[in-house]
Image (spheres, grey):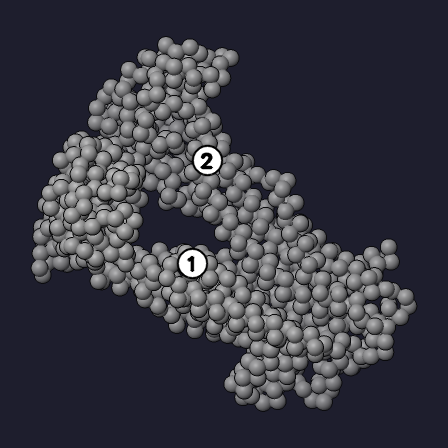
Amino acid sequence: MTVLKTSMRNFVAHKGRMALSAVAVLLSVAFVCGTLVFTDTMNTTFDKLFQATASDVQISAKSASDTGETTSRTGKPPVLPASVVGEVRGARGVRSAEGTVFSTSVTVVDADKDKLSPSSGGPTIVGSWNGNDARTMEIASGTAPKGPGQVMVDADTADRHGLKRGDEIGLITALGTHHARVSGIAAFKVTNPGAAIFYLDTRTAQQTLVGRTGVYTNVNVTAAKGVSDEQLKKNVVAVLGRDYKVQTAKEVADANQKQLQSFLDVMKYAMLGFAGIAFLVGIFLIVNTFSMLVAQRTREIGLLRAIGSSRKQVNRSVLVEALLLGVTGSVLGVGAGVGLAIGLMKLMGQMDMKLSTDDLTVAWTTPALGLLLGVVVTVLAAYLPARRAGKVSPMAALRDAGAPADARAGAVRAVLGLLLTAGGGWSLYAAATAEQAKTGSGWLGLGVLLTLIGFVVVGPLLAGALVRVLGAVLLRVFGPVGRMAERNALRNPRRTGATGAALMIGLALVACLSVVGSSMVASATDQLDKTVGTDFIVQEDNGQVITKQAVRAVKDTPGVARVTEYKLLDATLTTPDGRTVPKETINAADPTYAQDVRTKTVAGRLADAYAPDSMSVFEGFAEDHGIKLGSTVTVRFEDGGTAKLTVRAITSDEAVVDKGAMYASIATVARYVPADRMPLDDLLFVTAEDGREKAAYQALKSALHEFPQYTVRDQTDYKQELKDQIGQLLNMIYGLLALAIIVAVLGVVNTLALSVVERTREIGLMRAIGLSRRQLRRMIRLESVVIAVFGALLGLGLGMGWGATAQKLLALEGLNVLDIPWPTITGVFIGSAFVGLFAALVPAFRAARMNVLNAIATD
C-alpha cells in the first residue's frame, strides 16, 4: 500500500512531465484501435450486404467465378440457358426460381460522356430488375424499367452525379452503346459501400449485355418453408447434375468476403505495422522520461532507501507510475481510436465509399488489445529506469541530484552497438550481392533490423562525435550561447542518442522508401525508352477489354500508320518433358508487336514467333522444361481446341515489359479458337505516320470521345502516370509514418522540458550572471536543433543505405537504375532543423519565464 501511495503521489506531482509520454501512448493505441474498428466496420457492412443480396441458392455457369463477377476477355458474361429455370422449379423444396442477367464489364456515361463509375474503385453493375433485388432495394421515386428505353439507378449514384428522372445515360458494352432514360431511383435497405448499380428490364439486359435472349447469367432459387439451403442445393444438383455452379447463400457470401478480406488484411496489417513503429518510437520517449525523472529524484529515492525502503519497493514504485501512465494513455487512446475510425469512415465517404456509423463495430477484443499493448509497452519501457532507481543507495541522499554515469556499462554498450552495426552492414552487403531476389530479401530484412538496433545501441557514442561536428559547423557562429547549447547536448550522450534515435527511425524509413520509389520510376522510365518502339498505347485502366467498335475507330484515325492488337488467352501447356502446366497465359498479338516492343531474346528472333503455328517462351520456363528452339509445345486453349506450336524464340528473363510472357500471333490462335470465343483486345499499340505524331495524338483522343473508358497515352504520359502512382503510394506511406515522427517530436519536446527542470538552478545562476532571456531561449532552441539534425543525419544515412541495397535486389528484376532523390533528402534534412526549432518553443518559453531567485534556490 505504501508503494502504491508513493507512486500515486509522484505520478500526480509530475503529471505535467508525464503528459507528453501519455500523448505518445494515446496516439499509438488510437492508431491500433482505430485500424481495428475501421476494418471490423467494413467487414460488418459488407457482411450485411452479401447476406442480404444473396438468394437461398444461386446457379451460374460452370466458368463463372465464385464471387459472381462477370468480367471476361470476351466482354460478355458467361451464361446458362433459360431452360434451367423450368428444370429447377421442378426440384423438391423449391418455392420459386427466377433467371437474372448482370455484368460488371460495362461503362456507364451521362449525356456529356462523363463516366458514372464510383471514384472509390467500386464496381459498376448493370443487370435486370428482379425479385431478389426487390428484397434489398425499394423504389424511392419513379418506376422500375419497362422496355429498352428505360433504366433505373441506385439512389447513392443518383445523388453523387446529380441524376434525376428523365436524364439520358449510355451503357457501353462489348456489343455497343445502349441509350436509355432514367425511369426510377431505387434506395438500398442496407448500406451500399460504393457500387454503382443500374437496372434494365430482363429482355433489354439480355440483348444489351449478352447479345441474345433465352439465356441468363444466374438463376436465383428460393427455398420452401422448412427447407435448408444445404438441402435445397442437394435437390437442385440432383436435377441439374454437375454441369452448372450451384452455391448456397453462405457460400456466395463467404466467397465475396474472402476476396474482400485479402484487401482488408493488407490494409489492416500495413496500418498496424505503422502503429508498431509509433510504439517503438514511443518507447524511446518513455525510457527518456523515466530516466530523467529517476535522475532528478535521486536524492528523494536515496531518502526513501535511508528510511527503510528496499530496492524492490523503489523498483515497484517506478513501475507502478509507468502502469498508471500506460492505463491513462491507453484508455484515452481507445476512445480516440473510435473517433479516428469514424473520421476514416467520413474520409472514405468523400471518396465515394459509403460506410454508415450504424454499422460501427467495436469488438471487445479491440479495447482489450489497445489497453494491453499500451500498458505492456509502457511498463517494459520503464523497466530499465526502474531497475536503475532500485540501485540508488541511501548515501545518494547526501549528494546533489543526478546519478553518476556507469562508465563500464557505456563501454559494453558501445562495443555491442558496433558489433550489431557491423553485422547489419555485412548482411546488407550479402543482400546487395545476392544472385536471387528471395535470398537477398532475407539478408536485407536482417540487415535492416541489425543496423537499426546497432545504431540505437551505439547512439550515445555517435552523439558524442556528431554533436561536436555539428557544433563546429552550426553552433560556433552563435558564440558563447552556441557553445553552451553544444555542451548541453553533450552533457548526457545517452539521452541525446535516445532522443535522436526516436527521430531516426521514421526518417530512415522515409529515406529508404524515397530511394526505392525514385529508383523504380527511373528504372521503368529507362526501360520504356529502351523497349517501347510505338508512339501510343490505348487501354482501359480498370482492366476491361477494348471493344471492336473502339478498335475500328482507332484504325480509322487519320495519321495512324499501323495498329497492333494484343490479346490474352488462358491455356494448358504440355511441354516436351511430358509435364502439364495449367493456367498459363498466351499473349497473342499481330506480328508488328515485335517492332512495337523491343524484347530481348536469348535464342531466336521474336519476329519468328509470329509465324504460323509458332510461339515463344521465356528463359526460365525453357530451362525448367528442357525447351530449345524447334521444340514442340502442345497448347490446349481454354475456350478452343488444341494446337501443337513450335518454339521459334526464347525471351530473356531480364525483360521488364511483359516479363515472363509467351507470344504467338493472333492468326495462329484464330485457327484453334472460335470467333465467338476469341477474346477482345487488352491493349492497342498505335504508331503514327512519320512527322504526324502530335496530330495523330489529338486525332486519337477525338476518335475515342465516344469511348470514355479508354485512355490514349504516349510515352511521356506513361512515365508521368507511373511517377504519379508511385508518388501517391509514397505520400500515403509518408502520411502514416508522420505518426511516428510526431511521437518523435514529442520526445524532443519532453527531453528539453525535463532537461530545463533538471537544470533549473543552473539556469537561474546563468540568468544571475547576465544571460538574457533571449539568449536563454536561443540556447535551448539551438540544443533542440542539434538533437533533431543529429537524428536526421543518422536516419537519412541509414535509410539511403537500406534503399540502395533494396535497389540492388530490384535490379535482379530488371530495375537497374539507382536514383537518389536529393531534393527530397535535402528537404527532409532542412525540415528536421525546423522540427527542432518547433520542439523547443514551449520549453524555451518556460525556461525564459523562470524567476531567477526561485531558480537559484531550487534543490
Residue drawn at x 45%, y 42% is 262
Left or right of residue 93: residue 342: right
Task: Please name which of the two marks, 2 or 1, marks the residue nearer to the observer.
Answer: 1
Label of residue 439 in the image = 1
Kindly state the secondary structure of the residue where label 2 is placed: helix
Task: Please name the residue that numbered disc 2 is placed on.
Answer: 257
Q: Quadrant of the C terminus?
A: bottom right
Relative image position of residue 199 (x, y in whole percent): 32, 28
619, 94: nearer the viewer: 619
Residue drawn at x 54%, y 51% is 272
Whether residue 382 is visible here, answered yes or no, is yes
The 10 Å Cα crowd at callout 1, few under 14, some 14 to 19, many 20 or more, is few
Kindly state the secondary structure of the residue where label 1 is placed: helix
Q: Is residue 757 above or below residue 321?
A: below
147, 246: nearer the viewer: 246
Residue drawn at x 30%, y 35% is 71
Quadrant of residue 755 within the rendered picture = bottom right
Relative image position of residue 416 (x, y in whole percent): 61, 72
Left or right of residue 172: residue 343: right
Residue kind at label 1, given as amino acid type: Thr
Relative image position of residue 107 (x, y in whole percent): 28, 38
Whether residue 332 is visible here, answered yes or no, is no
Quadrant of residue 89 within the rendered picture = top left
